[in-house]
Image: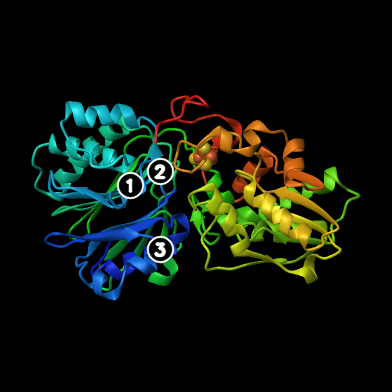
Amino acid sequence: MCGIAGIYSHKSVANELYESVVHLQHRGTDAAGIMTYDDRMHKEKGMGLARDIFTQDNLSLLTGNIGISHNRYPTHGGFGHGEVQPVWTSVPYGIAIAHNGQITNYDELVEEVTKTEKRYLNTTSDTEVILHVFAEELNKNGNPETSEEFFDVLCDVVSTLFKKVRGAYSITALIVGKGLVVFRDPRGIRPLVRGERDNGNDGKDYIFASENTMFYSMGYESKGNVLPGELIFVDNEGKLFSKRLVKEEFNPCIFEYVYFARPDALLNDVGVYRSRLRMGQNLAFAWLDKYPDIKPDIVIPAPSTANTSALAFAHEIGVRYSEGLYKNPFVGRTFIMSGQEERKRSVRHKLVPQDTEIQDKKVLIVDDSIVRGNTSREIVRMVKDCGAKEVYFVSACPPIQHPCYYGVDMPTSEELIASKKTVDSIKEMLGVDILMYQDIDDLVEAVTRIGDHHIDNPCMACLDGHYVINGRKVHERIKD
Ligand code: SF4
């Protein structure tokens, strides 16, 4: 999972791209980068958090009113500086791209790019492959002069790319001398939203980003989504061209709503906060059905993604909601930290149980999901150490049984606790008195109940094993 943004503005974009990276920080803390251009490209990128990479001094060197940014959370490729996006190539024109997603035919495309087209790949990142497929197609398509001619060429280029590149990819790109290019894979697996702002001179500024979380503070108005299979081009003068090149089944990732997206985001016309409230509500209805005689004394969220679902859950079952685990906001998200030991250690650095809320109580913990199980087990241990009488654990997400090949770090079945163990044995492993998961249908209902959306068939491959790209088989793992 990553965060991307692209901005065309009437003024310098560097500070606004920095703000975008900060507002998308939850989508990747591994690295970040910004590229802009005026008469030439300017870039700044590095490892770690945005606030540690960018300074007023280095941002002042990123001149130009068109640019793109990236927050990195690696799912494909190594961890080196060379993999930090945006990545760029000088031929043709000078192209830089930022990518959110993961492609599933990486090996095949590497063969084509390096052997057939004799291009050099400097990293193992799938983004670099997409860049060269795009660049090669653009290079073959003559020398268009006007923006209209260039957009026609882009339509051909991206149509071909859609046929060649399989998997999940939302892309922002800049092309020197031409403008800003944005497209989203035909299944729309990863999100990409758009916004506009009057620039005060009868023109418009445009922003495209993984989430609309920065629109409010930057004065942009939400204008919906980049559609699956859609191409958008904003030329150097701010003229916008768009076309939906292909229409396939829409399969947005359901896990965005469970975990990744910020609660204030509106993705695919569904509010993430409201969908999490509904997840908690459906979970509560299932609890009341299954355990009508068991009432906890308090409901505690595993902070902080689960706060919203826990709030609704507590309300529906008529039990006090308590923030019985304090979360230190200055420690990174455990799920996107690399290394199992690091993740385990960080749980106790990050969460502190409050005796007054837990001791001698029947505690029900709501978590957003159980991926590997180690974080959940640590949380249960902490609550028990604090003197809880009984501990119940409910997950807003159904059992995650299969790896994700579309941009979320669920690398192997072996690491997914629900792929090998039954609910009863997970309950034993966690050491809880009751373990209950959300039902798949209830999760889908929670995401799709309200909103002017078109989500008929979200991707849930990690839950049900049905891979939406070309019938990909469950255990057909691509090489990292
Ligand atoms: Fe999202 Fe799961 Fe599909 Fe991956 S497999 S895109 S995490 S729903």
Asked if the residue at label 3 sits under 8 Å from ligand 1, the reply is no
Residue 288: percent from left, percent from top: 83, 48
Residue at 65% of width from left, 61% of height from top? 307
Estimate the x, y position of residue 184 in percent, counting from the top left. Answer: 36, 43
Circle 2: is it few (<14), some (14-19), or many (20+) Cα within 10 Å? Answer: many
Of 128 and 247, the residue lying toward us = 128
Q: Residues within 10 Å of mark 3 (few under 14, many from 20)?
A: many
Asked if disc 1 and disc 3 are in contact, CB closer than 8 Å, the reply is no
Q: Amino acid at mark 1?
A: Ile
Q: Are marks 3 and 2 in contact (CB under 8 Å)?
A: no
Judged by depth in the image, the label closer to the viewer, 1 or 3, is 3
**Disc ID at residue 101:** 2
Residue 171: mark: 1
463 displayed left or right of 231 = right
> Is disc 3 placed on a helix, strand or loop?
loop
Point out the frontmost of discs 1 and 2: 2
User: Circle 3 is placed at which residue position?
Assistant: 49
Q: Is residue 189 above or below residue 8?
A: above
Please state which amino acid type lies under the numbered disc 2. Answer: Gly
**Percent position of residue 136, x then y:** 18, 36
Tell me where residue 121 sits by quadrant.
top left
Residue 270 seen in the current view = no
**SS for tag 2?**
strand
